Amino acid sequence: MKKYHVRLTPPERDELEALTRKGTHSVRRVKRGLVLLGAADGAKDETIAGRIGVTTNLVARTRKRFAEEGLAAALSERPRSGKPPQFKGKPEAYVIALACSEPPEGHARWTLRLLARRMVELEVVEGISHHTVRRMLKRGMSNPGSVASGVLPR
């Protein structure tokens, strides 16, 4: 016996069918919509999970959120836990600008460690690891050693 039953009103069903059939929505949102439609049709969690390609745990959680909080909450993302990004905006722009500039005397190109050291010297940040610099450059789609990035002349 299921503890959380999904009973959709006609407008909710129309909204879910539109969500799953057309438009540009996140895959997670569409899958949750499919879960709710399957649950409303009386399918078992295992059947729904197999048909959509999700876990039975996700089916149960979606069903529970719908029953307790409504359609909007069941379809949406909850805020994720974890530490927020430490270096956003100005530090990220500095790293990219530095990577695109001329390397220091005696070096053919910027390395991640050189970039990290220079960021501290410029007092943009108090401290930063070369791994963080790599992630920033990757996010900014910059590759300082790549010819295609425009940093090095052809």
Image (cartoon, rainbow, N blue to C red):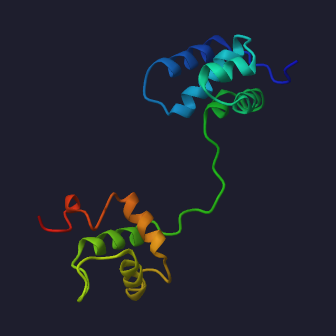
Position of 62 relative to 121 (above/below): above
The x, y position of residue 120, in whole percent, is 43, 85
Quarter-wise, where is residue 101 in the image? Answer: bottom left
Position of 149 relative to 13 (above/below): below
Whether residue 48 sits left or right of residue 101 in the image: it is: right
Q: Report the label total.
A: 0
**Residue displayed at 63% across by 11% down:** 10
The x, y position of residue 9, in whole percent, is 67, 13
The x, y position of residue 103, in whole percent, is 25, 80
**Residue displayed at 41% across by 72% down:** 91
Quarter the N terminus occupies: top right
**Residue displayed at 72% across by 13% down:** 43
Whether residue 101 sits left or right of residue 79 in the image: it is: left
Question: Which is nearer the eye, 10 or 101?
Answer: 101
Question: Which is nearer the eye, 28 or 16?
Answer: 28
Position of 128 relative to 149 (above/below): below
Quarter the C terminus occupies: bottom left
**Residue displayed at 58% across by 27% down:** 31
The x, y position of residue 20, in whole percent, is 52, 20
Q: Given the current orientation, which residue lies at the most extreme left position?
A: 154
Position of 105 relative to 3 (above/below): below
Q: Given the current orientation, which residue lies at the most extreme right position?
A: 1
